[in-house]
Amino acid sequence: MTNAGKKGGAVRTSPYTCLTAEVAITHLERILSTDGAESLFGLPYWRARVEQISATPGLNPEHRARLAKLLAKT
């Protein structure tokens, strides 16, 4: 895991690498494009997941743009 800064007093970390983030982003795009985002966990959970992936060092501009769109949905 990598440190990615602090939010709310806790160190935010990401279990992803720039190589594994693609799969995670695609998964979140699929979930957040359906009603599934609110069915089990709710939007706060999904927002935290998007923020967690956003904390991954080395993401490319395309990944960052896709994550920004996901944050706008949560």
Image: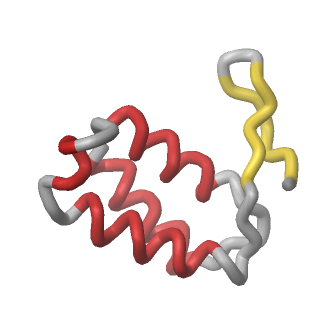
Q: Position of residue 5 (x, y in %)?
A: 79, 37
- 16 shown above or below 10: below
Taking the view exactly as shown, the residue that stands out farthest to the top is 9
Q: Determine whether, in the image, residue 16 is placed left or right of residue 2.
A: left
* Closer-to-camera residue (38/59): 38
Residue plotted at (76% across, 23% down): 10
Visual colour scheme: secondary structure
- 10 shown above or below 73: above
Taking the view exactly as shown, the residue that stands out farthest to the right is 2
Residue plotted at (72% across, 76% down): 18
Quadrant location of residue 40? top left
Quick one: quadrant of the C terminus? top left
Q: Position of residue 67 (x, y in %)?
A: 46, 62
Quadrant location of residue 58? bottom right
Q: Position of residue 38 (x, y in %)?
A: 21, 42
Q: Position of residue 43 (x, y in %)?
A: 30, 38
Taking the view exactly as shown, the residue that stands out farthest to the front is 40
